Amino acid sequence: MKKIVAITTGGTIAMKLDPCTGGLIPAVSGKDLLDAVPALKDIAEIEVVEQSNIPSGHMTPAMMLDLSRKIDELAKDDSIAGFVVTHGTDTLEETAYLLDLTLHTEKPVCVTGAMRGASDTSWDGPGNILAAVKTAACDAAVGQGVLVVLNDTIHAAGEVTKTHSVNTATFASPWWGAVGHVYFDKVVFRRKPIARQKIQPEKLVPDVYLLKCVAGMDDFLFRCLIEKKIKGLVVEAFGCGNVPPGVRAGILAVRRARIPVVLATRVYGGRVVPCYSYTGSAGEMLSSGIILAGELNGQKARLKLMLALGLTDDNEKLKEYFKP
Ligand code: ASP
């Protein structure tokens, strides 16, 4: 029987209703969380490591990188076949993506969570943990990169995003779809995440910000960020990479301050494409040295920039990391 390490970090999956406040709060230890899934004994030998018990909104990029280091350290143990990370769903896609970029191990790492707390009649935690362990223990998951497993559906870390605030089928990979599914008796993969990348700096650069474009937006926030001497900026533009005139002025000012700017899109799917040349389009701003984020959403582009800046501050070299 394979040995899977379950690293628990917190999230709704480890929360219960607090009768005093009427809301969910962290309440389930790592051991109790895994003990709630007796069926695991038929799938794998489980070792529990309680990393933290926090809402995922309290997770930071530095904590994500610590988690990555911890997994790589544990992965040196030949007796360990794979990993399951339990995590709040709010920032789950960010942790999964950072792990995918930074991990050295090719052992399966499956990140899961729950949309209902442990005190809820429809707690989806145990089913998600079971599916994640089945996936992590499956030979076909080796070398697939970090996988997000919820609702019996397997997604690639680079493609998945949270799409609904409360529905248990919240995780989706818009325009790409799942890479596999978990059944009662087996785990089925139908495609491989092929556009995976590695960025493995000693440390990441924290002062990287994300701004989202809205109609009529001006350059005020951009000027504040220049004053703050930030190290990098991601802008979620409209459509395939177009911004209002005020934002264009802001972006050009940030570039004049020699701060890298990555242009992502606020749209749910598709790449940033420099197909226009009107004022404020990605094509028109290219000569300022802006970096196009490809298909990455803003939150993932930010993490990628933080890691890449840990290796170089050369704008041309940074661009290379965003090419795939
Ligand atoms: N707010 C929770 C968290 O991310 C949501 C969840 O886990 O589903 O920690």
Image (tube, rainbow, N blue to C red):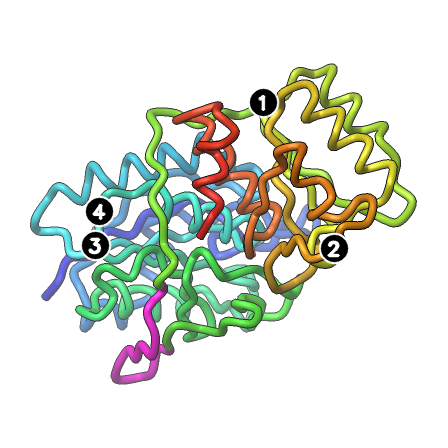
154 vs 272, nearest the viewer: 272
Task: State the residue position of label 4.
Answer: 105
Secondary structure state at the residue bearing disc 3: loop
Label 1 crowd bin: few (<14), some (14–19), many (20+), radius 10 Å = many
Amino acid beneath label 3: Lys
Q: CA distance from mark 3 to mark 4?
A: 5 Å
Mark 4 vs 2, N-terminal side: 4
Prevalent SS, magenta region: loop
Mark 3 vs 4: CB contact within 8 A = yes
Labelled disc at residue 276: 2
Give the Cα separation between the discs numbered 2 and 1: 28 Å
Bounds of the magenta segment: 181-193
Which residue is found at the position 33% from the left and 25% from the top? 202
On screen, residue 29 above or below 131? above
Nearest to N terminus: mark 4 or mark 1: 4
Residue for point 60% across, 54% down: 17
Quadrant of image for the N terminus: bottom left
Going from N to C along the chain, the mark reached first, 2 or 1, is 1
How far apart are the alpha carbons under marks 3 and 1?
33 Å
Query: Toward which corner of the image does residue 166 lie, by quadrant?
Result: bottom right
Mark 1: secondary structure: loop
Residue furthest right in the image: 216
Q: Position of residue 196 (x, y in %)?
A: 36, 54
Residue 222 placed where, x, y %? 77, 28
Q: Secondary structure under badge 4?
A: loop
Q: Amino acid at mark 1?
A: Lys
Q: Which residue is mark 1?
A: 231
Q: Mark 1 or mark 3, which is nearer the start of the sequence?
A: 3
Residue 302 is covered by the magenta coloring: no
